[in-house]
Image (cartoon, rainbow, N blue to C red):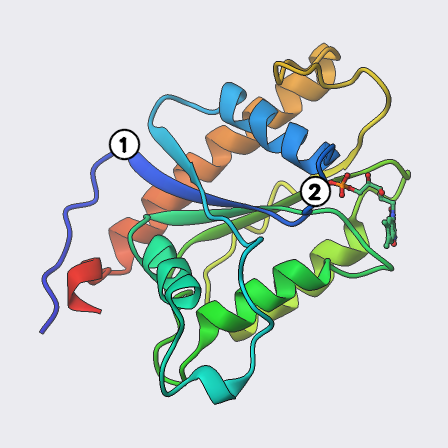
Amino acid sequence: MPTIQHHQPPYSVGYFVGSLATNSINRMLSQALIRLAPVELEFTEIPIRDLPLYSYDFDADYPPEGRALKQSIESVDAVLFVTPEYNRSIPGGLKNAIDWASRPWGENSFSGKPSAVIGGSIGAIGTAVAQQNLRSVLSFCNSPQMNAPEAYIQITDGLITDDGDVTNEGTAEFLRDYMNTFLQFITRVLTVVPQPRSSDT
Ligand SMILES: Cc1cc2nc3c(=O)[nH]c(=O)nc-3n(C[C@H](O)[C@H](O)[C@H](O)COP(=O)(O)O)c2cc1C
């Protein structure tokens, strides 16, 4: 019988950046979100760069990168996905990480873990199609998702500074509200859905 955690803030949030690019605009967006988030949320990046390509051949003996990924997810209260759209879907690197975390069968690290999805694009559609794809994947992985607000961010030159400041006050206010709503969502999920301690999983 797992021990039930007492879900008081602060809450730990593991965040995924879907892009591996050095100058990723989604990495910039992730830093802006962290700056605008309420103090009750504490952030750690969950890296995906060094994962091999997943195959179920690994299920019998996960490599250290796969085990570390699962442990990172299981040790946080919630996960946040900040992703670009590549060819109307999520980047392969991010899908690979989700596949790793979802297995071995019966040991899906996302099950019951509250999540939120956001993304930035240079285009006007602002990752809407990729996010719908990602939501479908997370539904299958049994992750309770924040449904609203949706956040499709068109990242124009200068919108986010190198320090992670958002220069447009309307956008900053929208992102601040997004992160405040995420805190409320995490609180609701962790209040009603008992979570096992990571040491029990
Ligand atoms: C392989 C590839 C596919 C892309 N496909 C899309 C797309 O489907 N929709 C879109 O809005 N932008 C697309 N873009 C443009 C991205 O929005 C842009 O490269 C952005 O910088 C990606 O985010 P990142 O810098 O965080 O990687 C694509 C870019 C690449 C490299």
Place of residue 73 in the rendered image (x, y in percent of width and height, measured from the top left)? 38, 56
State the residue at coordinates (51%, 31%).
Answer: 179
State the residue at coordinates (71%, 21%).
Answer: 171
Q: Quadrant of residue 122?
A: top right
| Residue on which the image places disc 2 | 119
**Residue 164 horizontal side relative to residue 4, left or right:** right
Place of residue 139 in the rendered image (x, y in percent of width and height, measured from the top left)? 55, 69
| Residue on which the image places disc 1 | 10
Q: Amino acid at mark 1?
A: Pro
Tag 1–tag 2 contact (CB < 8 Å): no
Question: Is 107 above or below relative to 72?
Answer: below
Q: Quadrant of the C terminus?
A: bottom left
Place of residue 131 in the rendered image (x, y in percent of width and height, measured from the top left)? 71, 55
Place of residue 37 in the rendered image (x, y in percent of width and height, measured from the top left)? 48, 25
State the residue at coordinates (35%, 77%).
Answer: 107
Element carrying mark 1: loop
Task: Measure how far apart labels 1 and 2 are at the Cα level.
Answer: 24 Å
